Image: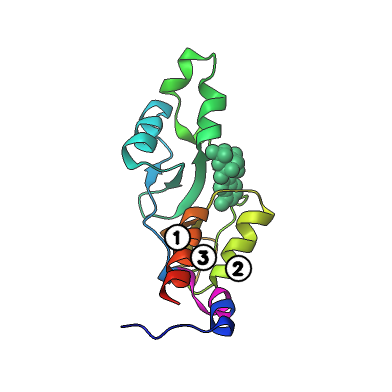
Amino acid sequence: GKRSLNRLERSDWWHTTPVKDIQSVAITIQATTTVNDAVISLFLEDVGTLVVVDENQILAGIVSRKDLLKVTLGNAQAQAMPIQLVMTKRPKIYTVSPDDSVYEAARKLIYYQIDSLPVVKAVNENNPQALKVVGRITKTNIVKSLIEVESDA
Ligand code: ADP
């Protein structure tokens, strides 16, 4: 089995574990998806945030449960609206790359007061702004991994 981690190695875990080791799959939708279908995806996929991408999986925005609550509350028409009108858009999206440390991801989640970060890769040398979505990291991912490290120790 696994060798036990000593105290120093456990604190090192934060800085040496890359995001890609603990990330989860990003649930993605297109900007043309309706608010109604986005709400259905939240429930079916059991997530709190949806990542909005184009047809090439390039990051376009992010939509959270509060974004959806805000637009639907007292507005029956909102269900047919495209998610484009509701989402937080690039370039205002905070992201991490697969090789960033778990510490860096945790720091951003707390600093920016958000629940999740898309994990992205620049895929086109000529267009460094085009970020391909390869995963998602949440506070839950991080807490779960911490518990695993602690119980392995
Ligand atoms: P909730 O709104 O369900 O509590 P969040 O706290 O994650 O979920 O989202 C708060 C706001 O921040 C929302 O308007 C959402 O669109 C936006 N947001 C969520 N994640 C990010 C991110 N990675 N970068 C920028 N904005 C984000």
Q: How is the image coloured?
A: rainbow
Residue 57 appears in which quarter of the rendering? Answer: bottom left
Q: Position of residue 94 (x, y in %)?
A: 59, 55
Question: Under 8 Å from ligand 1: the CB of mark 1?
Answer: no
Q: Secondary structure at mark 3?
A: loop
As rendered, which of 96 and 47 lies closer to the eye?
A: 47
Can residue 113 be seen by looking at this rendering? Answer: yes
Q: Position of residue 90 (x, y in %)?
A: 57, 49
Say if the magenta span includes residue 15.
yes
Ligand 1: give its quadrant.
top right
Q: Is residue 66 left or right of residue 132?
A: right
Residue drawn 51% across and 65% down? Answer: 127
Q: Which residue is mark 1?
A: 144
Residue drawn 57% across and 26% down? Answer: 70
Q: Which residue is mark 3?
A: 127
Say if the magenta span includes residue 57.
no
Amino acid, disc 1: Lys
Q: Position of residue 75 (x, y in %)?
A: 52, 15
Residue 134 image label: none
Neighbourhood count class around disc 3 (C-alpha, 10 Å): few under 14, some 14–19, many 20 upward: few
Q: Position of residue 37 (x, y in %)?
A: 36, 30
Magenta residues?
12-19
Q: How far apart are the two marked residues, 3 and 2, measured between alpha carbons? A: 25 Å
Q: How far apart are the two marked residues, 1 and 2, measured between alpha carbons? A: 17 Å
Q: Which residue is mark 2?
A: 104
Q: Is residue 1 above or below residue 132?
A: below
Amino acid, disc 3: Asn
Which quarter of the image is occupied by the N terminus?
A: bottom left
Q: Nearest to the eye among marks 1 and 2: give it.
A: 1
Q: Is residue 14 left or right of residue 122?
A: right
As rendered, which of 24 and 57 lies closer to the eye?
A: 24
